[in-house]
Amino acid sequence: MATLLTSRPDIIAILEDRGYRSTAPRRAIIRILEDMHEGFTAEDVGRELPGVGRATIFRTLKLLMETGVICRLNLMDGAPRYSLSRIEHHHHTVCVECGKVGEFRAATVERLMRVIGEDIPGDIVGHRIEFYVNCDECIGDEPS
């Protein structure tokens, strides 16, 4: 059974603990991200912060990915979408209708990876699993 994840990290503390400065643009971007409960794009962040340059937004998103604070997801059409990470290792669901991103952990997936690992030459050093779904809200919005 999959476990849904809901807690959020203290992003500023994570960056400061790793030696990164807490600049005004970074704090503004992080405030916006903390309010985004679904997946988001760099363009979404830019619309919310017209005074912050596009390059600053992309650099900050890259830094947040490198520190494990956010995840980058590739949608079925190849467009990048991001989500805040709630734990270190997890998997994602992405709604193909509204773009909502969910995170989960499933012991079954991890057991499957161990079994598959026995058949793959070399050592598996990581994996990503994304399920593309129609979320409950979008299914509920469909006409009867």
Image (cartoon, rainbow, N blue to C red):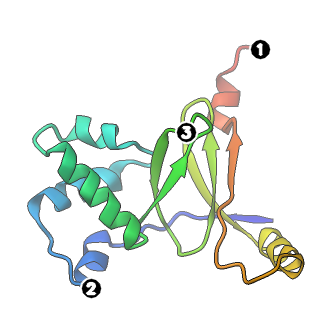
Residue 101 x, y percent position in the rendering: 55, 48
Q: Which comes sooner in the sequence, label 2 or label 3?
A: 2
Q: Which mark is residue 74?
A: none
Q: Which residue is mark 3?
A: 78
Residue 131 vs residue 34, the one in the foreground: 131
Mark 2, residues whose alpha carbon is within 10 Å: few (<14), some, or many (≥20)?
few
Q: Is residue 108 above or below residue 76?
A: below
* Label 1 Cα neighbours within 10 Å, binned few <14 / some 14-19 / many ≥20: few
Q: Secondary structure at mark 1?
A: loop
Question: Residue sitting at 33 percent across and 44 percent down?
Answer: 42
Q: Could you tell me the amino acid type at mark 3? A: Gly
Residue 41 position by quadrant: top left
Report the residue at 18% width, 41% height from top: 49
Position above or below: 44 against 35: above
Question: Which one is in front, 107 or 53?
Answer: 53
Left or right of residue 93: residue 65: left
Q: Residue furthest front?
A: 121
Taking 12 as reference, is 103 left or right? Answer: right
Q: Element under label 3?
A: loop
Q: Given the image, on which type of amino acid does mark 1 rest? A: Ser
Label 2 or label 1, whichever comes before in sequence order: 2
Q: Of helix, strand and loop, which one carries label 2?
A: helix
Q: Is residue 140 above or below residue 128?
A: above
Tell me residue 9's x, y (percent). Answer: 39, 71
Expressed as whole percent of the image width and height from the top left, the position of residue 38 reads 47, 46
Q: Residues within 10 Å of mark 3 (few under 14, many from 20)?
A: few
10 to 48, vertically: above or below: below
Q: Amino acid at mark 2?
A: Asp
Mark 2, residue position:
17
Q: CA distance from mark 1 to mark 3?
A: 31 Å
